[in-house]
Image (tube, rainbow, N blue to C red):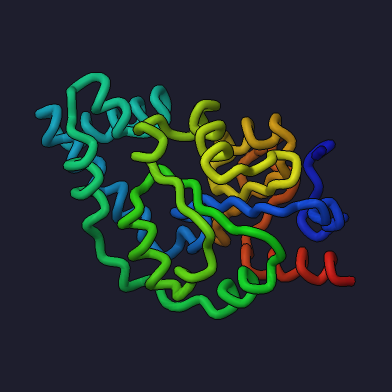
Amino acid sequence: MPTGKVPAGDDLSVFAGVRDWIFDLDDTLYPPESGVFTAVMGRIRAYTARATGLTAADAAALQKEYAARYGTTLRGLMEEHGVDPADFLADVHAIDRSALVPDARLAEALLRLPGRKFILTSGTHAHVGETLACLAIADRFDGVFDIADADYLPKPAEATYAAFLDRFAIKPVTAAMFEDAPRNLVVPRALGMRTVLVTGRQAPPPASPDADFITADLSGFLSRIIDALSG
């Protein structure tokens, strides 16, 4: 079981017992600098403005409030305004993904990583499929658990992790979680997973006491894990 945050590059042997590798999608499997999730957020704020009748500025403030209180803006809009989740999700994911290109380094690392690989996301299966296709890594994953699978209850809700783990028969103590949001590592770490915070390259990493490792280079970090396990 993890015993504390370890700087990336130190004692990667702690991954020796991992059989299941769990990844968030947005700003984790691709860099935030791509602007893809920024585009999603822009559409989320625009949808919030339309659904509430607020000005753009007030809608942006409400969006942040709902995301903090409910885990996602969608959950807040569902609870407070009766928004149809299918309509919301189709709208906010109608984005340009042309900034995403095939990632050969990541594809190779995922192929060599021993065990099963999964995606746990607050997005949709359709968004996952289109994004992975752009990155040319769609065939590297054994399963996807999206926001509808979670009954629209987003991370970091404990029930969502429990449902995901049950769906794929994953034991937390032999799993690792990769996330860009520190709060989404709290439950995985408490359950006994190895936890990795994936950050952007252009900003200092946020404080994350629940991250055992922090990296701004997911492909490189996975390659170092593979080398450590095969050494």
Q: Residue at x 29, y 55 (%)?
A: 39
Q: Is residue 218 visible?
A: yes
x, y percentage for residue 138? 45, 69
Horizontally, is 48 left or right of 204 in the view? left
- The one nearer the camera, 89 or 6, is 89
Image quarter where the C terminus lies is bottom right
Q: Residue at x 70, y 42 (%)?
A: 211
Q: Residue at x 36, y 60 (%)?
A: 36
Q: Residue at x 56, y 37 (%)?
A: 166
x, y percentage for residue 177? 63, 47
- Count of numbered marks: 0
x, y percentage for residue 65? 35, 26
Please say if 222 is above or below 41. below
- The residue sitting at the top extreme is 80
Q: Is residue 204 visible?
A: no
Horizontally, is 76 left or right of 192 in the view? left
Horizontally, is 79 left or right of 205 in the view? left
Horizontally, is 20 left or right of 165 in the view? right
Instruction: Tell me which corner region of the image, top left, top right, bottom left or bottom right, holds residue 218.
Output: bottom right
x, y percentage for residue 172? 69, 39
Please say if 84 is above or below 33. above
Image quarter where the N terminus lies is top right
- The one nearer the camera, 70 or 162, is 162
